[in-house]
């Protein structure tokens, strides 16, 4: 079997899970080397044959894949973005079909999606454009006359232009001639969306050609008023617009403007009184049979099932002062999904038992039941498993304790195992050498490590990345535990360090020579560093200072033009 796989726009973690699995299991990969980020090849196993198709003809590509197929290899044909856009895949698929070789296609995240993400843009803004035109300037591949840029520009729609980075002047000219846009129409260029070297240029059709000078490859040009500031609010999330998952709000007064209300349903006199007291204390609307209606108590307009159907999609919570059976029957036809269903709480009309019936966690029914029970002096009945066993979900714990989850796929197993008492482990450590004895381990990485960096001016980002990777590997510490990077203020604008920190969302702290000089510890001392920076050691001193005086885990280690040291943030023990 041959799999055509969309590699995504560049970042290795923007491939689909299915695509990644196929790469992992592939024994032959034929990739479009001119565009696919080679980092994706690190998913391949060590024995896998890798062919770059950049210099091959169609025949050679087919021949290579056919060879793999006859040798019974699992072959992945890796294309950038999504294969269906400018991927020249149709001709390959047709040849394979003719040869009787089976194939499948796995879609990918196209670069136009990554570009929108980089721009924080939405192509389909209400009141602006509901259409996205995906096109290109004519190059060696001809573009049909009726699709000439001028003709497409007539519509003034949102536009994503591929394969045209070297022709921005001609492109902007053609777009303005079409009539749908003007010289002031917003335009942007996104270079290498999602790659470390991503760049975003924003301007107008008039300014973009000048701004884009020098960029000739791997860029998209986006055009249209969707890049501007004016639009109408979306109908999807508008309260007066009903759709499948939510009924329209027709202007009925709510507890708080716009917020979905808590609604109470009661059926007995005592129940109505209790519901009124509760709604007074915590806000909400009370519905009762006609004969109990009075001020601040509205009568049901029909059966309770109709009432439930009306409120279930639009209330934050439904509280039934009634038998659980009445509530269960009333809401049964409305149930959708725990992600969207409201909280449902049931209590008897004396308020003795307050049952969290539906949406205990996400919908907040457990909390609501506890609040109501506190008001009535009754008992909150909670039946969701993790609460009754007083076990906190592992991912909640991780977040609360400032840890990064390394292998999220283990969470489900760990939660189930905790309930069932199965063997499993949670390792909370910044160390990578530890070999846990459990069959499944959830790895949580505490934010403990402070990296001190000293370097020459203008070092290459790749060199810095590689050095840090090697350094941490040598120290046996996880990348995910990096909390802070620190250096001397002379390095405040050092592009490679800034980029490293930006990509990983790690803060970068700098200190002046005097502050660094005051730090005490067993630091090495270099005359040359002293001459250049005013302090005899940058990386170790910066690491220890930024860590709040924590211990040095790895002393100064040299790479070409780079010195690194590692400290553990004070107060952070090694926890396992
Ligand atoms: N199938 C790919 C497009 C291949 S054609 C996809 O779905 O994205 C190659 C063109 O795609 C490039 O000339 C450029 O215009 C665009 N492109 C591909 N990757 C890009 C990226 N990461 N950032 C910006 N443009 C990109």
Image (cartoon, rainbow, N blue to C red):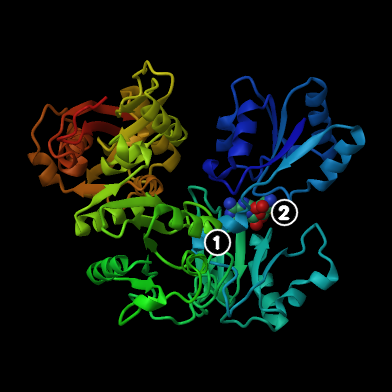
Question: What label sits on residue 508 in the rendered view?
Answer: none
Residues 339 and 237: in front is 339
Asked whether mark 1 lies closer than 8 Å to ligand 1, one says no
Task: Establish if 281 lies above or below 470.
Answer: below
Q: Which residue is mark 2?
A: 85
Residue 471 visible in this rendered orientation of the protein: no
Question: Would residue 536 appear left or right of 251 to someone viewing this image?
Answer: left
> Would residue 54 be seen by someone viewing this image from the given angle?
yes
Q: Residues within 10 Å of mark 2 (few under 14, many from 20)?
A: some
Residue 121 appears left or right of 97: left
Is 127 placed left or right of 563 in the picture?
A: right
Task: Answer with the quarter of the image where residue 104 lies.
Answer: top right
Near-viewer residue (535 or 378): 378
Identity of the residue drawn at 31% across and 38% down: 388
The residue shown at (79%, 30%) is 65
- Determine which of the numbered discs, if any, sits on residue 116 in the image: 1
Tell me the crowding category of disc 1: few under 14, some 14 to 19, or many 20 or more residues within 10 angstroms, Cα based: some
Location of residue 262 in the rendering, given as x and y in whole percent from the top left corner: 36, 67
Looking at the rendered image, the quarter that the C terminus falls into is top left
Quarter of the N terminus within the rendering: top right
Q: Is mark 2 within 8 Å of ligand 1?
A: yes
Q: Is residue 499 left or right of residue 110?
A: left
């Amino acid at each position: 079997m041959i799999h055509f796989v969309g590699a995504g726009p560049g970042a290795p973690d923007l491939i689909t899970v299915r695509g990644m699995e196929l790469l992992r299991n592939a024994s032959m990969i034929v990739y479009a080397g001119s565009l696919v980020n080679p980092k994706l090849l690190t998913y391949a196993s060590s024995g896998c044959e890798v062919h770059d198709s950049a210099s091959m003809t169609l025949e050679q590509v087919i021949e290579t894949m056919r060879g793999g197929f006859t040798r019974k290899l699992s072959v992945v044909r890796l294309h950038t973005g999504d294969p269906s856009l400018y991927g020249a895949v149709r001709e390959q698929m047709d040849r394979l079909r003719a040869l009787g070789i089976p194939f499948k296609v796995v879609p990918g995240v196209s670069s136009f999606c990554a570009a929108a993400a980089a721009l924080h843009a939405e192509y389909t803004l209400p009141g602006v454009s509901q259409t996205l035109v995906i096109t290109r300037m004519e190059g060696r591949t001809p573009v049909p006359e009726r699709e000439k840029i001028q003709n497409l520009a007539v519509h003034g729609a949102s536009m994503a232009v591929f394969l045209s980075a070297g022709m921005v002047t001609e492109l902007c000219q053609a777009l303005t001639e079409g009539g749908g846009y003007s010289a002031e129409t917003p335009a942007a260029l996104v270079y290498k969306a999602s790659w470390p070297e991503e760049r975003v240029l924003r301007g107008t059709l008039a300014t973009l050609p000048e701004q884009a000078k020098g960029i000739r490859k791997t860029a998209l040009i986006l055009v249209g008023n969707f890049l501007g500031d004016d639009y109408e609010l979306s109908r999807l999330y508008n309260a007066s617009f009903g759709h499948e998952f939510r009924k329209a709000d027709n202007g009925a007064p709510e507890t708080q403007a716009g917020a979905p209300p808590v609604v109470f349903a009661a059926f007995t006199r005592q129940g109505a009184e209790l519901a009124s007291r509760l709604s007074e204390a915590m806000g909400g609307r009370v519905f009762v049979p006609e004969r109990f209606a009075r001020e601040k108590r509205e009568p049901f307009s029909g059966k309770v099932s109709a009432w439930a159907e009306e409120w279930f999609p639009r209330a934050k919570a439904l509280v039934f002062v009634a038998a659980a059976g009445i509530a269960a029957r009333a809401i049964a036809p409305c149930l959708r999904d725990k992600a969207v269903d409201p909280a449902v709480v049931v209590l008897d009309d004396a308020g003795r038992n307050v049952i969290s019936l539906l949406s205990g966690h996400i919908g907040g029914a457990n909390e609501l039941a506890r609040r109501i029970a506190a008001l009535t002096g009754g008992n909150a009945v909670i039946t969701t498993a993790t609460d009754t066993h007083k076990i906190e979900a592992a991912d909640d714990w991780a977040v609360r304790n400032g840890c990064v989850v390394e292998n999220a796929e283990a969470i489900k197993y760990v939660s189930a195992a905790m309930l069932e008492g199965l063997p499993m482990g949670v390792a909370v450590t910044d160390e990578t050498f530890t070999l846990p004895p459990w069959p499944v381990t959830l790895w949580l990485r505490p934010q403990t490590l402070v990296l001190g960096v000293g370097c020459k001016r203008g070092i290459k980002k790749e060199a810095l990345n590689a050095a840090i990777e090697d350094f941490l590997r040598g120290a046996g510490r996880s990348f995910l535990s990096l909390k802070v990077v620190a250096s001397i203020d002379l390095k405040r604008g050092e592009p490679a360090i800034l980029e490293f920190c930006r990509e990983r969302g790690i803060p970068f702290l700098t200190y002046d020579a005097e502050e660094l000089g005051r730090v005490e510890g067993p630091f090495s001392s270099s005359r040359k560093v002293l001459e250049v920076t005013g302090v005899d050691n940058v990386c170790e001193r910066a690491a220890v200072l930024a860590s709040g005086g924590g211990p040095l885990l790895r002393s100064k280690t040299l790479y070409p033009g780079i010195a690194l040291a590692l400290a553990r943030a004070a107060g952070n023990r090694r926890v396992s």
